[in-house]
Amino acid sequence: MNVVITGSTVLTQQGEQRLDVRISNGKIIELSESIKPEVEDQLLDAAGCHVLPGFVDLHTHLREPGKEDSETIETGSRAGALGGYTALVAMPNTTPAQDSIPIIDFVRAQGKRAGLVEVVPSGCITIGRAGSALAPLADLARHGVQIFTDDGSGVQDPALMRRAMEYSRDLGITLAQHCEVSALTAGAVMNECSCSSELGVPGWPALAEELMVHRDIELAKLTGAKIHFLHLSTAGSVRLVREAKREGLPITAEVTPHHLSLTEELLRTFDSTFKVNPPLRSAEDIEALRSGLLDGTIDAVATDHAPHVRRDKELPLDQAPPGMLGLETALGVVLSTVPMNAMDLAKVMSINPARIAGISDRHGILPQVGQPANLCVVDMRAEWTVDPSKLASKSRNTPFVGRTLRGKVRHTVFEGDVVVKNGEAQR
Ligand code: DOR
């Protein structure tokens, strides 16, 4: 069955154009001012909406295998599709961790089975993410894994990180670092600031992130390897990346919607919904992150979608796991906090992340005849209120419940199939 999108503004290489779109066999086959649908065509009304390349999330915790009570590849994929995503990079801190070919195959197969987005498994940098021996990077790279990380923790040992970078340069893969010097964050529950002192809780200094950003920039200089910095959260990190990019180093970086929008002050409630790694920071940090995103220092918005079951998040603040949901609210939070036009949005949520993940042959492509139909149709002005009963994620740990956001996904088309129509998942 063909799909016809009508009434839309399409973001093309020539800019925004009022065009209809016809899709057949997974590809865009026609873009023109007025397409007459056939009776058997599936029609998507996109009046007032933009057709953009489907979003690509560089940072999704899908929890399968190992923690299927908080999310599965299928429920996370559905949440992603509802958020306008057509590809999700699955983080490797599963149980077992994604450090071997059978686990990578399993994650890919479960993604295919769900059929809602492309699930792109990342590989671990070190075996079991334990930080002591390198994972089989070459075997995994030969098996199509393009992005490697120990996310959830950073690689602490600089010699091991140097070796990983030497291999990654030769293999043409990307290493993605979770920047946290763990010796500086033991027991920490929130940003180290006057607020953490007042509350009497252990703080997480900005330096714990910035030291590792600095170290890895120096290692990138030494080795010539590419490095991607996950979930940057401090003004100092933005400065370091800006300078490194000025020197021409092959560095990329991401920021989460929550670090762009929520401050450390929220931890005064002692509500663990706001506990996240890295922690929410100050208003000045938020300002620096927003400027960094707008001036291209930060390449991508990535969700760090981190589902956790209620009984875990209800533990006292020091014991509750860090993390919050992100996939279904990312667009709304970003458009509600950072002034962006459709092209800015496509760059940071689709084009750049697809390039960093190594999947830009099929995702992050501005709509063109002959290209794969991985698209989202978004109303950039629509306001909506986050209703937890409507979330597709298996978990509910989002701080945005009850908030009114601007920017809503109307339809998502994955490999030519309509997986979300009028804001409802079709599978
Ligand atoms: O808040 C976070 N939660 N940050 C991480 O780096 C890991 C993630 C998780 O797995 O829950």
Image (spheres, rainbow, N blue to C red):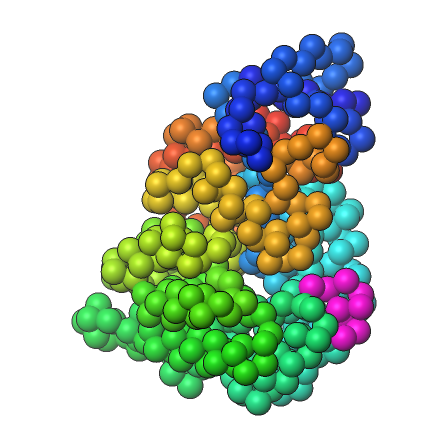
Foreground pick, 81 / 46? 46
Q: Specify the farthest residue to the bottom.
A: 159
In the picture, measured across the screen, residue 420 lies left or right of residue 308, that is right
**Residue 264 screen position, x and y as percent:** 29, 62
**Residue 418 screen position, x and y as percent:** 68, 30
What is the span of residues highlighted in magenta in the rendered image? Answer: 138-146
**Residue at position x 61%, y 37% from top?**
366
**Residue 297 screen position, x and y as percent:** 42, 59
In the picture, measured across the screen, residue 32 lies left or right of residue 41, that is left
**Is 71 a magenta residue?**
no
The relative height of residue 293 versus residue 335 in the rendered view (above or below) is below
**Residue at position x 64%, y 18% from top?**
32
Q: Does residue 267 appear in this view?
A: no
**Is 142 a magenta residue?**
yes
**Residue 7 screen position, x and y as percent:** 56, 17
Disc count in the image? 0
The relative height of residue 56 versus residue 414 in the rendered view (above or below) is below
User: Residue 43 lies in what quarter of the image?
Assistant: top right
The relative height of residue 58 versus residue 401 in the rendered view (above or below) is below
- The quarter of the rendered structure image containing the C terminus is top right
**Residue at position x 79%, y 54% from top?**
109
Q: Does residue 345 appear in this view?
A: yes
The relative height of residue 140 versus residue 20 in the rendered view (above or below) is below
